[in-house]
C-alpha cells in the first residue's frame, strides 16, 4: 500500500490504520465519535495527501475542460474554485473533483488545478489525456506524488489557521483560494472541505507538509483541535449528504441522478455525455439519490435493500448512526416514483425489515 508523507506522524499519534483506495491511512486516533464531535464543535485536522492533483495547461486547456467537466471552468476567475464532475460518453460519472483556476501562463492562457479522488488518480489522468484532440495543445501534469494536502475543518478553523499564516484567511470566501506561506512553507489555501463545516484545505509540497501538520496541531491545541481519520471524514460527509465516489457515484450513475444538477452546465457548446445529461435534466431521471432515516432499531448500511411494502426497489449506498443527530441515517437510490420526502420505506437489516422514511436533504446543515 502507498503511504502519505505523514505516515510516521500518524503512527506516533497512535492512529488505527486501514487500507483505503490502495493507501494505508488513519481511520481514527481517539475514536470516530470524538473526532466527529471535534469537527462539529471546534476543529479537526485531516491528512488527505492521498488525493490526486493534476495541472492542466496549454492553449486549449480551457476548451478541453469545458468539454470534459460538467461545470464550466470558463466561469472561474483566477483564485476561484468549483465543484464539478467528469462525465463519461454515456453520461455516467468517471469521478467528482474540485477545479481551481490558477494564474494565466506567460502566453495568457488559463491554467487549472484539479484535485481528484485517490482511488481514481490513474483512471482520471488517462481518461482526460485521451480526450485531447489531434492538434490541440493541452497538457495534463500529474503532481499527485509531489503534493501534500491537509483539511482543517470546523467552526474554529479560521482561529487555528490565522496565527500560522499572513494570508487573510478569515476574509477568504468559500471556493476561493490564496497562495502564500503557512508555517513558513509555500502553500495554496482554499476555503473548501468535505465535512459540511467551515474550513480550509492546505496544499504544499509533499516534503513540506509535515511542518504544516505540526504547526496546525500546535496552534489548535488550545482550541480543542483533534487529528482526525477517515472514519470521522465519512460520518461527517454523510451527515452533510455529500456523495462519495464508489458509493453514491460510479460509471453508471449520472450527476442528475445523484442530485447534482446545479453542477451540470448544459449551455456549453459541447460536453461529453451531454445527450443523457440533457435527457435526465429535461425528463427527470428514472432513479434518484435520497436521504433516509430509520424509524425503528437498525442502521442502514451500504448494500442493504430498500423496500416499499415487501418489494425491494433500491439499495443503501452509505449509512451510519449519526453522532450529531442521534439517528440512524443513510443514502440510497430509489425509483423516482418512490423518492418523495416522507415516503414510507423499509430497510432489510440482516433479514429484519426496519421501518424508514425519506427525509429532506441534507441531514445536517451548519448554522449560517
Image (cartoon, helix red, strand yellow):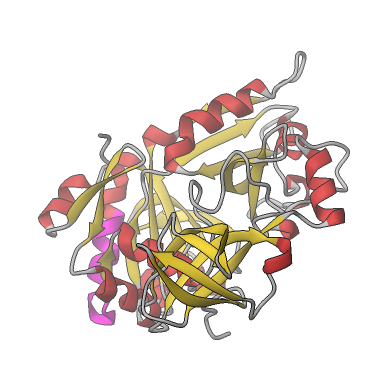
The residue positioned 72% from the left and 34% from the top of the image is 90
| Residue nearer the viewer, 287 or 170 | 287
Which region of the structure is painted magenta? Answer: 212-225
Q: Main secondary structure of the magenta part?
A: helix
The quadrant in which the N terminus is found is top left
Q: Position of residue 219 (x, y in %)?
A: 27, 71
Q: Position of residue 228 (x, y in %)?
A: 29, 64
| Residue nearer the viewer, 253 or 10 | 253
The quadrant in which the C terminus is found is bottom right
The residue positioned 47% from the left and 34% from the top of the image is 121
In the displayed image of the protein, which residue is found farthest to the top?
134
| Residue nearer the viewer, 308 or 87 | 308
Q: How many marks?
A: 0
Whether residue 252 is visible to the viewer of this picture, yes or no, is yes
**Left or right side of 31 for 36:** right
The residue positioned 77% from the left and 14% from the top of the image is 135
* Residue 217 is one of the magenta-drawn residues: yes
Q: Is residue 119 above or below residue 45?
A: above
The residue positioned 64% from the left and 56% from the top of the image is 258
Q: Is residue 253 above or below residue 154?
A: above
Whether residue 176 is visible to the viewer of this picture, yes or no, is no
Q: Is residue 303 above or below residue 93?
A: below
* Residue 362 is one of the magenta-drawn residues: no
**Left or right side of 102 for 189:** left
Q: Quadrant of residue 362?
A: bottom right
**Left or right side of 155 for 227:** left
Q: Position of residue 284 (x, y in %)?
A: 80, 57
In the displayed image of the protein, which residue is found farthest to the front?
310
| Residue nearer the viewer, 24 or 104 | 24
Amino acid at each position: 500500500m502507498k503511504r502519505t508523507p505523514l505516515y510516521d506522524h500518524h503512527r506516533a499519534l497512535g492512529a488505527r490504520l486501514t487500507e483505503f483506495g490502495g493507501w494505508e491511512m488513519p481511520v481514527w486516533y481517539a475514536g470516530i465519535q470524538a473526532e466527529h464531535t471535534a469537527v462539529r464543535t471546534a476543529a479537526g485536522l485531516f491528512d488527505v495527501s492521498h488525493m490526486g492533483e493534476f495541472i492542466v495547461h496549454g492553449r486549449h486547456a480551457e476548451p478541453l475542460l469545458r468539454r470534459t467537466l460538467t461545470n464550466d471552468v470558463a466561469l472561474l476567475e483566477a483564485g476561484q474554485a468549483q465543484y464539478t464532475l467528469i462525465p463519461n460518453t454515456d453520461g455516467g460519472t468517471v469521478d467528482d473533483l474540485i477545479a481551481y483556476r490558477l494564474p494565466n501562463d506567460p502566453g495568457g492562457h488559463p491554467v487549472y488545478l484539479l484535485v481528484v479522488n485517490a482511488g481514481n488518480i490513474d483512471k482520471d489522468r488517462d481518461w482526460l489525456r485521451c480526450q485531447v484532440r489531434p492538434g490541440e495543445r493541452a497538457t495534463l501534469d500529474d503532481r499527485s506524488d509531489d503534493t501534500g494536502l491537509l483539511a482543517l475543518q470546523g467552526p474554529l478553523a479560521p482561529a487555528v489557521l490565522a496565527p500560522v499564516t499572513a494570508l487573510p484567511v478569515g476574509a477568504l470566501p468559500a471556493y476561493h483560494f490564496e497562495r502564500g506561506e503557512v508555517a513558513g512553507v509555500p502553500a495554496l489555501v482554499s476555503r473548501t472541505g468535505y465535512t459540511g463545516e467551515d474550513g480550509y484545505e492546505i496544499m504544499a509540497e509533499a516534503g513540506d507538509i509535515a511542518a504544516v501538520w505540526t504547526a496546525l496541531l500546535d496552534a489548535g491545541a488550545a482550541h480543542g483541535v483533534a487529528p482526525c481519520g477517515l472514519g470521522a471524514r465519512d460520518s461527517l460527509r454523510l451527515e452533510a449528504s455529500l456523495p462519495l465516489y464508489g458509493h453514491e457515484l460510479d460509471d453508471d450513475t449520472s450527476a442528475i441522478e445523484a442530485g447534482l444538477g446545479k453542477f451540470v452546465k448544459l449551455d456549453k457548446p459541447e460536453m461529453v455525455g451531454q445527450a443523457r445529461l440533457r435527457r435526465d435534466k429535461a425528463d427527470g431521471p428514472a432513479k434518484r439519490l435520497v436521504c433516509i432515516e430509520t424509524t425503528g432499531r437498525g442502521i442502514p448500511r451500504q448494500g442493504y435493500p430498500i423496500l416499499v411494502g415487501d418489494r425491494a426497489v433500491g439499495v443503501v449506498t452509505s449509512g451510519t448512526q449519526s453522532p450529531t443527530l442521534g439517528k440512524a441515517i443513510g443514502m440510497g437510490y430509489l425509483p423516482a416514483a418512490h423518492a418523495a420526502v416522507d415516503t414510507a420505506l423499509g430497510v432489510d437489516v440482516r433479514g429484519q425489515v426496519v421501518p424508514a422514511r425519506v427525509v429532506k436533504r441534507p441531514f445536517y446543515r451548519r448554522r449560517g
